[in-house]
Amino acid sequence: GENVEQHPSTLSVQEGDSAVIKCTYSDSASNYFPWYKQELGKGPQLIIDIRSNVGEKKDQRIAVTLNKTAKHFSLHITETQPEDSAVYFCAASRSGSARQLTFGSGTQLTVLP
Amino acid sequence: DSGVTQTPKHLITATGQRVTLRCSPRSGDLSVYWYQQSLDQGLQFLIQYYNGEERAKGNILERFSAQQFPDLHSELNLSSLELGDSALYFCASSAGGLTDTQYFGPGTRLTVL
């Protein structure tokens, strides 16, 4: 089955700096890669996603890049703000009738004011 | 607010007992997924239903079962509970078909004493 590895497990940045979180996946059939933000006591919230026919996607301060050949994808957050502090999860799934997500282990991002 | 609702928010019970967790998907969504989040295992897929039918099974124990009703709400039944079943249980929904995007509910925190 699919295996998703995520690094780093913790990341501290100064407010205004950029943050980068990286994930690798093992199943070459995976073609959908979402990123979720989870705040304490809440469910994961989708922040951006990318499909395998696209190399990069951007939404304001958040961007995701995908390298299918190397089987890795990254989340980039620019101009970080204290409210960006949370746990971020990457995930992968393949097409077909069952589209369950395989998650990475999470990154605790702390933005220092 | 994702539009996915889960009840109850918290559940405290004893070993050997049985509990039922309930999920209502977003309006119009046909697919429901159940995930377990624990400190040692991370976020793991349990089971998926699509329009009332089981679509995929993940690492779900035999003591656990689920169903999706004609009104599309879903229930996850956990029986013969063990201490190790203490975790957060999330439900996610998607439109189904070719749509991958999953929206998560706020979760149910289960504590087994």
Image (cartoon, coloured by chain):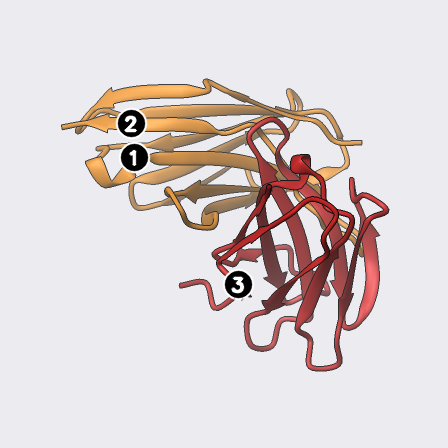
Going by the numbered disc 2, the residue's amino acid type is Thr
Pair 1/3: label in front: 3
- Which chain does the numbered disc 2 sit on? A
Q: Which residue is mark 3?
A: B8
- Which chain does the numbered disc 1 sit on? A
Q: Which residue is mark 2?
A: A110
Going by the numbered disc 3, the residue's amino acid type is Pro
Could you tell me residue B107's position as x and y percent? 52, 54
Using the image, tell me which numbered label, if any, was put on residue A85. Answer: 1
Res. B101 in view: no
Image marks 1 and 2: residues in contact by CB distance under 8 Å: yes
Going by the numbered disc 1, the residue's amino acid type is Ser
Could you tell me residue A39's position as x and y percent? 37, 43
Residue at image point 78% right, 66% down: B67
* Same chain assignment for discs 1 and 3: no
Figure chain in orange = A
First along the sequence among labels 1 and 2: 1
Could you tell me residue A19's position as x and y percent? 33, 25
Residue at image point 73% right, 65% down: B97
